[in-house]
Image (cartoon, rainbow, N blue to C red):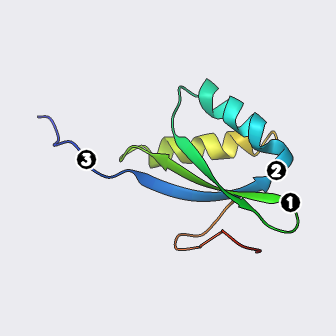
């Protein structure tokens, strides 16, 4: 039985050093383009906030990716409902 198509993506907010954004993109692309991200800007400390969007049902795989990326550079997964557009 097939499930009906979902019309909304899921999302996570992340924060990482601005200098690590290019590597984050590289790793995400290497992970079969698991998700897309949008930069929401940097705080005064130079940490970039990202909005990561992905297909419904892929949250566990995205979280595995986030944990793998954390082995390469510091990466903060922000709590649900957080608006990371400004300073932490």
Q: Is residue 31 left or right of residue 86?
A: left
Q: CA distance from mark 3 to mark 1?
A: 36 Å
Q: Is residue 60 above or below residue 27?
A: below
For residue 46, the mark is 1
Q: Residue 22 versus residue 67: which sits nearer the camera?
A: 22
* Residue that badge 2 annotates: 18
* C-beta proximity under 8 Å, tags 3 and 1: no
* Residue 60 position (above or below residue 76): above
Choose mark 3 or mark 2, whichever is in front: 2
Instruction: Please identify the quadrant where the N terminus is shown.
Output: top left
Tell me, for residue 6, which label it has, or none.
3
At x 54%, y 57%, the residue is 12
Residue 88, quarter of picture: bottom right
Q: Earlier in the sequence, mark 3 or mark 2?
A: 3
What kind of element bears circle 1? loop
Q: At x 77% / y 74%, what residue is drawn?
A: 87
Answer whether residue 75 is visible to the viewer in this image.
no
The answer to which of marks 2 and 1 sits earlier in the sequence is 2
| View extreme (front): residue | 41
Residue 32 horizontal/vertical position (percent): 53, 25
Dot 3 alpha-carbon crowd within 10 angstroms: few under 14, some 14 to 19, many 20 or more: few
């Amino acid at each position: 039985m097939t499930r009906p198509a979902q019309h909304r993506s899921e999302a996570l907010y992340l924060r990482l050093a601005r200098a690590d954004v290019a590597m984050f993109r590289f790793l995400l692309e290497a992970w079969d383009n698991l998700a897309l991200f949008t930069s929401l800007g940097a705080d005064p400390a130079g940490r970039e906030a990202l909005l990561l969007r992905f297909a419904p049902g892929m949250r566990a795989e995205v979280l595995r990716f986030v944990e793998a990326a954390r082995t390469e550079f510091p990466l903060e997964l922000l709590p649900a409902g957080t608006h990371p557009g400004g300073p932490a």
